[in-house]
Image (spheres, rainbow, N blue to C red):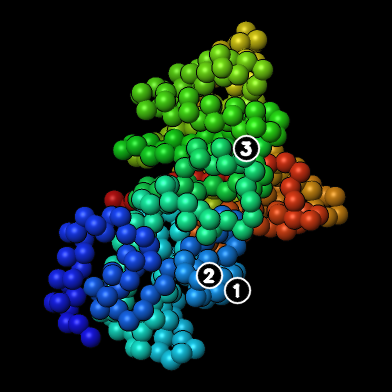
Amino acid sequence: MSTPETSDALLYEFLADPAHLTLDLAAALDRCTKALGLEHAAVYLVDLQQRHLVPQTDVASVIPVDGSLAGWAYRTQALRVEESDSGGVTAWLPLVDGAERLGVLALHSSALTSAILIRGRALASLLAMMITSKRAFEDSFVRHTRTEPMHLPSEMLRAFLPPRTIGNDHVVSTAVLEPAYELGGDAFDHSLTRTTLHVSVIDSMGHDLASGLTSAVALAACRNARRNGADLPTLVEVVDEALARWLPDQYCTSVLAQLEFETGLLRWSNCGHPAPLLIRGEQLMVDALEREADPPMGAPAYLSPEPRRTHETRLEPGDRVLMYTDGVTEARTREEKLFGLKRFADYVIRATAGGELAPETLRRLIHSILDSQAGGQLRDDATILMFEWQPPVH
């Protein structure tokens, strides 16, 4: 077993060598594990629908997210330890990049000490950054986390989507989108600046490649305006112009919003979309964000004599805001009953009361909706985005 000094030297040597940037995950994991003086480690990445933890080697088996200790570590973003079948112990550490849950790291050791745990956490952090930097252009990551072939419209649209979860000390924003492999026109976006969270949920007309293209153009126009410093009214106008010019026969509904970290000021524009929901404490604040909607984005905006409107309200610490597409509330159970707005809100309220993390709340919620459908299939795209404002206590 290497000493702490030699382990540190090996790790520094690994990080200083530019070649580590070109290593595949298995080679990088092997070198890092040895450099840190650890016995054995394995990476499991969560699949697209967050139901399984998939090993990145062919030796280990797929592990269910629900009903396993590894899954518990993923769901709670906390360390879990169990006795290993081969002797010793296995520590399951969450792989998290920022606020985004990627999977878990299995750390096998004959004995678990505080020094080993510290090195294991360092390894998990390093691997999470490596995975995030590589998965955009290494198809092996994508192929390992898909359980079925993806349709072309879904492939195109998912190329535009951000990570499921982002956040900082002030706010977390998280989203889920189904059906994972057969998307039509639903999409979401969220991003952070130094002062503001920007979020949007989009639902394009139809359920084909043209629908996906409409959402892709809307996302690109929104980001382009945002990155050029546009305020919210100008941003909506830019999206309207882009769709009217390039896809005049298409349109989409959307809610676009901005939340100021320091003040909790929420500004939003509703373009023909279901109104966002506000959950405060353990209550749905009925109609708190309900406003008369403007026309959908694109050509319909030019047929209305009224200008776009921007709405404002001030959140309280701990508030959760839900933005969604109608595929959520209009989903039907096997008994042909609507999932409905009340059931949707009640689920989030119960999860909030139980102290559940926001990403886990949405993971379990979308699975609940899917599992209640006949054949596990939705009739329409269903997207949910939730953000929570929790400013630091000074």
Q: Earlier in the sequence, mark 1 or mark 3?
A: 1
Residue appearing at x 70%, y 34% in the figure: 207
Residue 189: % across, % down:
50, 38
Is there any visible trace of residue 76 in the rendered image?
Answer: no
Residue drawn at point x = 28 percent, y = 70 percent: 31
**Element type where label 2 sits in the image:** helix
In the structure shown, which secondary structural element does the residue marked by tag 1 occupy?
loop
Between marks 1 and 3, how big is the CA–CA gap? 33 Å
- Residues at marks 2 and 1 touching, judged by CB atoms closer than 8 Å: yes
> In the picture, which quadrant includes the N terminus?
bottom left
Q: x and y percent of residue 165 in the render?
A: 46, 49
Q: Nearer the viewer, mark 2 or mark 3?
A: 3
Circle 3 Cα neighbour tier, 10 Å, few/some/many (<14 / 14–19 / ≥20): many
Three-letter code for the amino acid on which mark 1 is drawn: Gly
Indicate the position of residue 260 as horizontal and vertical percent values: 39, 36
Question: What number is the disc on residue 71?
Answer: 2
Residue that numbered label 1 is attached to: 67
Residue 314 in the figure: left or right of residue 370: left
Tell me the amino acid under the disc marked 2: Gly
Cα separation between marks 2 and 1: 7 Å
In the displayed structure, 260 sits above or below 252; it is below
Q: Which mark is residue 153?
A: 3
Expressed as whole percent of the image width and height from the top left, the position of residue 19 reads: 24, 57
Residue at 20 percent of width and 82 percent of height: 2
Image marks 1 and 3: residues in contact by CB distance under 8 Å:
no
Residue 130 makes an appearance in the image: yes
Quadrant for residue 197, please give it: top left
Residue at point 46%, 83% (across, down): 82
